[in-house]
């Protein structure tokens, strides 16, 4: 488990969500309890007034004109949840479910969802006891909220469906019982509040962002290693170039490359060479990675806002009291953010693969063919570059925007949807591919640097190379290479290159 995080509804930093994603324990700030209880009391006042309130004493979606008798309101919420448990596919990763639960607690903790404190408290207890709902990963179109996956979260709270208890899969009733947690009997509005919202899409998008941030940092390091492996020029990183253009991401990326390469004896050794320009994959790294950095920062800002938002419907405002129907459940901001992250992931990997292709080509790199000490008898890094190319093309295909798609649902009541769930869910598969692409560059660039011995690189890049060489030796002769690639990929995913590139705004 990571550090403990206090959930402050509406006031969480992106770092807080990152800590929860990485395994941090969650406790709810009790300061929000009063506002939550006022929201629940407002629901009762509205019922007592006899007004028709969508989802509280009416049907749902196209059935909103159907009035429900007071005696059937609890049954209404129960049936709503059960009927919406229509998802399919593999279960969501448990870590993303934890994040989704925390996001839902934060949204309801703002006090305008009309739920009782017991709902928040029980979800908190479930996370503390490692009771994690089993939730199929397919079935949401990103409006009217992530209905199918969130309904299975609500069902688990009621003791219906399945959960993981400390990793063991069992019925929700058994899991709650073993953890000493009493199932919640939903009150008016509570089922709708639980299953309406963008928390599924937002959890996946945040997870994709966090993995993309780590991959970005790692790609800065491996890209700088490729510069030294190819004896590339430092001139393209000159701050005067980037100040003239003005994009902050580009300026920051160039500074990161300068810091990574500072003090490299390999670089100093060819300061007076007659090479004029390097290929774009080396020379244009600040421009491409800087653009990706700007995109990731914009997506991060959008997702931080969304993570702190209230996205169910209708919203209950105790002053009045008023119940106002709107459309905060529409996940278009998340869809756009996910598409932006996907584009950045695809381009980071594309540039990395081009550097690998350059390094294995003796006409471009000046190094032995395919980075083998004895090419011909050995194929060296010929096929690892092919693997990187395959992964890059796969990510290019997956980077097509999801947000431009829509399909009407609920008898055309919900006639425009965001597809945020699709856009966000693909990100982890894309970042997994990117981690492997970066790992392949790490192996390739380190091999290239080894040919320059006894000259050393900078302290930062020697640290990166030493971390790899502690696990994987230089490729002298061809060997069964798959385990080396798998181990390097694991190291990238685990953060072995974290902390080497100093860059503000990316964790």
Image: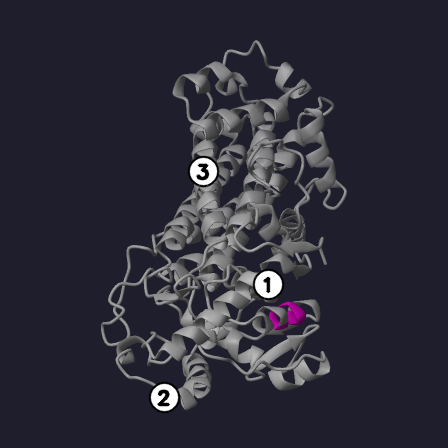
Mark 3 surroundings within 10 Å by alpha-carbon count, few (fewer than 14), some (14 through 19), many (20 or more): many
Which label was assigned to residue 194? none
For residue 69, the mark is 2
Residue at the disc numbered 3 = 292
Main SS of residues in magenta: helix
Magenta residues, start to end: 122-126
Q: What residue does disc 1 label?
A: 33
What is the spatial separation of the Cα atoms under label 1 and label 2, in whole angstroms?
A: 29 Å
What residue appears at the point 34 percent right and 86 percent down from the top-left corner? 68
Residue 412 horizontal side relative to residue 394, left or right: left
> Where is residue 463 drawn, in percent x and y?
72, 33
Q: Return the x and y of residue 491 as percentages of the image width and height.
A: 67, 48
Residue, x 68% and y 24% (percent of image)?
458
Q: Quadrant of residue 294?
A: top left
| Residue 274 screen position, x and y as percent | 50, 11
Is 465 on the left or on the right of 145, as rendered?
Answer: right
């Amino acid at each position: 488990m990571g550090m403990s995080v206090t959930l402050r509804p509406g006031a969480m930093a992106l770092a807080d969500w990152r800590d929860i994603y990485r395994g941090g324990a969650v406790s709810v700030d009790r300061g929000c309890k009063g506002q939550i209880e006022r929201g629940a009391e407002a629901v009762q006042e509205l019922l007592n007034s006899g007004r028709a309130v969508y989802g509280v004493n009416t049907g749902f979606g196209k059935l909103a004109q159907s009035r429900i008798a007071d005696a059937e309101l609890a049954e209404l919420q129960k049936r709503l949840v059960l009927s919406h448990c229509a998802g399919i596919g593999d279960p969501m990763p448990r870590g993303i479910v934890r994040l989704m639960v925390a996001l839902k607690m934060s949204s309801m903790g703002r006090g305008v969802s009309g739920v009782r404190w017991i709902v928040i408290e029980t979800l908190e207890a479930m996370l503390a006891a490692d009771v994690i709902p089993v939730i199929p990963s397919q079935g949401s179109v990103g409006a009217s909220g992530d209905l199918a996956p969130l309904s299975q979260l609500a069902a688990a709270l009621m003791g219906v469906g399945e959960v993981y208890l400390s990793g063991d899969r069992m019925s929700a009733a058994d899991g709650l019982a073993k953890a000493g947690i009493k199932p919640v009997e939903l009150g008016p509005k509570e089922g709708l509040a639980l299953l309406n919202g963008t928390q599924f899409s937002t959890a996946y998008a945040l997870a994709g962002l966090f993995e993309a941030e780590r991959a970005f940092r790692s790609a800065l390091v491996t890209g700088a290693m490729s510069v030294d492996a190819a004896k590339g020029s430092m001139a393209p990183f000159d701050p005067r170039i980037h100040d003239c253009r003005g994009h902050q991401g580009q300026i920051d990326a160039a500074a990161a490359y300068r810091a990574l390469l500072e003090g490299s004896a390999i670089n100093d050794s060819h300061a007076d060479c007659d090479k004029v320009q390097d290929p774009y994959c080396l020379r244009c790294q600040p421009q491409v990675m800087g653009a990706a950095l700007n995109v990731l920062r914009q997506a991060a800002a959008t997702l931080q806002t969304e993570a702190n938002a209230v996205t169910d419907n209708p919203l209950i405002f105790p002053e009045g009291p008023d119940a106002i129907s709107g459309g905060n459940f529409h996940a278009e901001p998340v869809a756009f953010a996910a598409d932006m992250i996907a584009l950045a992931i695809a381009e980071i990997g594309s540039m990395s693969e081009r550097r690998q292709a350059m390094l294995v080509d003796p006409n471009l790199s000046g190094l032995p063919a395919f980075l083998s000490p004895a090419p011909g008898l050995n194929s060296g890094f010929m096929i690892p570059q092919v693997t990187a190319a395959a992964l890059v093309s796969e990510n290019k295909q997956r980077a097509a925007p999801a947000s431009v798609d829509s399909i009407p649902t609920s008898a055309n009541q919900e006639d425009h949807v965001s597809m945020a769930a699709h856009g966000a869910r693909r990100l982890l598969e894309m970042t997994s591919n990117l981690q492997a692409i970066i790992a392949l560059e790490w192996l390739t660039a380190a091999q290239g640097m080894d040919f320059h011995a006894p000259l050393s690189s900078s302290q930062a890049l020697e640290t990166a190379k030493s971390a790899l060489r502690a696990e994987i030796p230089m490729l002298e002769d061809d060997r069964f290479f798959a385990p080396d690639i798998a181990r390097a990929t694991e190291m990238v995913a685990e953060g072995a290159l974290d902390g080497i590139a100093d860059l503000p705004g990316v964790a």
